[in-house]
Image (spheres, helix red, strand yellow):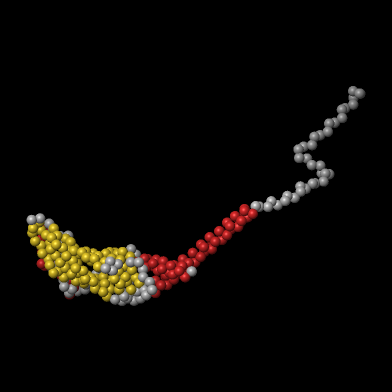
Amino acid sequence: MSAGKPPPPLPLQRPPGYRDPNTPIQHPPPQKAVKLPPSFQQAKRRRACCRICCCCFCIAMVILVFVSVSAALTFYLWFQPRLPQIHLKSIEFTKFNVSTTADGPVLDAAATVAVEIKNPNQNLGIVYDRTHVLLSAVNGDASLGEQTVAGFSQSKNNVTTLKFAMRVDKEIVDGKSAEELKKGFKSKSLLLNAEIRSGIGVKERRWATTPLQVEVVCDGVRFSQVEGGGGGGGSMPKCRIKVFNWYVYCFLILVKRLIQEILLQM
């Protein structure tokens, strides 16, 4: 070997991923579609059917509620349900005696209380649950008796008078209250409170609502105003009805009733 001849060059190594451009491209064979087991396909179909049924049910319920509310609003505007008008018509005492015993002053009293109830509705009747009445005297804060009568119904645009028999025997009062009761009854300036608890609902020919519990208060009525039913020459004392929003209650009852009617027809 001659000392002046250079060694042959070493071949370069190909980098990773190098592809010879002259080599034809070979495509991988197509993969066969994997067939799902029949049980998986049935479960998928069942889930789809459940979703469709749920959507249809929700849409039907929305339509039902919308139709019911619209119909109830129409009925409400037509009937225009109103609360009854209640007046304390008369209080007749057949006995009122304050006496002194070994236990102190006692009150014996018996009275008949007349309450006038007017139904102002032109298209609806009113139903009343059991009615409980308590009578008391503001002077001396003494109870004058209580009574409960059975429920009843009232036709449209009707006036009804209820009578309650009140009685107390040997009701113990203090000395100051005894003097106030005697003076108030003698001068007819005795102040009386009547509290009425009942349930009130409305009815039509084919349906009636569930009575809503109410409290009626006739407070601070002077005895001279209602003695013997004369009204003291003036108008009868009007009582206040303490109740949850009556109009909202009637509207919701109408909606409930209409939904029940629609479901029964389906």
Left or right of residue 236, residue 40 in this image = right
In the picture as drawn, the residue positioned furthest to the right comes out as: 2
The quarter of the image holding the N terminus is top right
Q: Residue at x 12, y 67 (%)?
A: 95
Q: Position of residue 104 (x, y in %)?
A: 10, 56
Q: Nearer the viewer, residue 81 or 154?
A: 154
Given residues 195 and 183, the one toward you in this image is 195
Residue 16 image point, x, y percent = 76, 38
The quarter of the displayed image where residue 213 is located: bottom left
Q: Residue at x 48, y 67 (%)?
A: 64
Q: Nearer the viewer, residue 83 or 30?
A: 30
Task: Left or right? Give the position of 158 relative to 106.
Answer: right
126 up-or-down from 23: above or below: below
Q: Is residue 95 visible?
A: yes
| Residue 154 screen position, x and y as percent | 30, 73
Q: Position of residue 198 (x, y in %)?
A: 28, 65
Q: How many marks?
A: 0
Residue at image position (82%, 44%) is 23
Q: Which residue occupies the foreground of this view, 139 or 198?
A: 198
Asked where in the image residue 243 lies, by quadrant, the reply is bottom left
* Rendering quarter of residue 171: bottom left
Q: Residue at x 17, y 60 (%)?
A: 141
Q: Is residue 66 visible?
A: no
